[in-house]
Amino acid sequence: MAGFTTRGARGRRWIASGLVAGVLAGGGVLVGVSPVQAHSAVAVAVAPVPADPSALMVAAAANAARDRVTRLAKSGLPAEIRTSAWNALRSTRGDAAIAEWLAPGGGYDGAKQRLRDTRTRNRAFCERVVSTHPAAFSPEVRSAAQKALKGTDADRAAFVRTGYAEAQQRDRLKREADAAQRLEIAERDRAFVRALADGDPGEQVRVAAQWALRAGATDADIAEFFGYGWATGAALDVEAYRLRVADAEVRRHHQLSLLVARAVAAEAALTSAADTAKARAEAELAWRTVADHADEAHRAWLAEQEATRVQAENWQNIARLSQESADGVWKQITLPAEARQHDWAGEQAEAGAAAAFWQDMADRARDSESRVRG
């Protein structure tokens, strides 16, 4: 997103980039000159080339779409989405492949559909169990999950169906039999779980806390919440957030490309319109629609930035509490809390960058509307 900052230098930078690309692609323009001379030649060439605001907007939308797909490819999203994104980025069809991947029914939607496959869901469950159930607290569960991951689809299905619950029971029996592992649940621990059940910013954490406090629950359920339930709910909250914002941003970038193309065409039609006033009004409206779309996206990302800030601060506080607590039940949450704080801080930074991009696009669209108005 760093490429979408000050509008004054922005046009010159894109023109320079285009010229450099042309030199590299053409191969004959600057042959036989030194790198310093080549740089000077490009710098000289930049000056007389007029900036075409409409072309720059088209380029901005295309570059932003590619950047978004790149971010998804490098993200913490499921492998199906990341692999599909990389395939689109590596396509020899360039921007057309990116546009098709983002479009409804395209590569992104296809990857999302594959996430619903039972085999994919079973593997994801096993992977999540391994990442959220520490061996020190849940050795049987963790071992069974790792074994299922190394096995077949049938092995993973069996683990999801009955193996997980059976391994949970074995772990619970071992903890109950081993006095050294038996955890005392203080009233303050139970009160803390009640507070999470009522007001944690993560929906899945709230659900996990509510389950630990359900009718008939015992101290063992509270201990298991601290041991792995809290971490599992937190991991699910991060996964859900990433998928939700990816869904929204894929749609936004697809729509942005369509709206910019429509506005550029409406502006171009001014040169040959029989009714200039009508054509001008249509072009103004088209650019205003782009600005409205970008404004809406900007507001959405500001809200996401605030939500991720709250989550990052929440997990930072939990990590601190776990480190300071002498209570044995807290020791299992320290590493997951630190990991989630890192995750949410990264998402907060991403939200800030996205908000800045959409603000910039809204400003550009309003500039275009003013230019058309004259």
Image: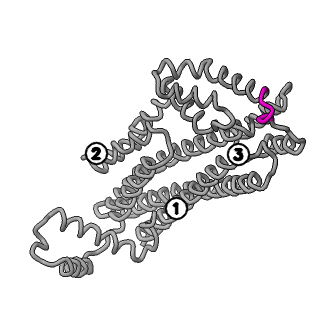
Q: Is residue 51 visible?
A: yes
Distance, label 2 to label 1, CA atoms, is: 26 Å
x, y percent for residue 96: 30, 47
Q: Tag 1: Cα neighbours inside 10 Å, few (<14), some, or many (≥20)?
A: some
x, y percent for residue 83: 39, 40
x, y percent for residue 146: 53, 30
Residue 101 falls left or right of residue 188: left
Q: Dot 2 corresponds to which residue?
A: 91
Kind of residue indicated by mark 1: Ala
Q: Dot 3 corresponds to which residue?
A: 333
Tell me which numbered mark, 1 or 3, is placed earlier along the sequence.
3
Q: CB of mark 3 within 8 Å of CB of mark 2?
A: no
x, y percent for residue 334: 69, 49
* Closer-to-camera residue (113/158): 158
Label 3: state its secondary structure.
helix
Distance, label 3 to label 2, CA atoms, is: 43 Å
Distance, label 1 to label 3, CA atoms, is: 30 Å
What residue is rendered at 46% in x and 30% in y?
113
**Which quadrant would residue 62 be assigned to in this image?**
bottom left
Q: Tag 2: Cα neighbours inside 10 Å, few (<14), some, or many (≥20)?
A: few
**Which quadrant would residue 60 be assigned to in this image?**
bottom left
Tell me which numbered mark, 3 or 2, is placed earlier along the sequence.
2
**Considering the image in quadrants, where does the C terminus appear?**
bottom left
What residue is rendered at 19% in x and 65% in y?
24
Range drawn in magenta: 177-182
Kindly report which numbered mark, 3 or 2, lies closer to the viewer in this rendering.
3
Q: Which mark is residue 353?
A: 1
Label 1: state its secondary structure.
helix
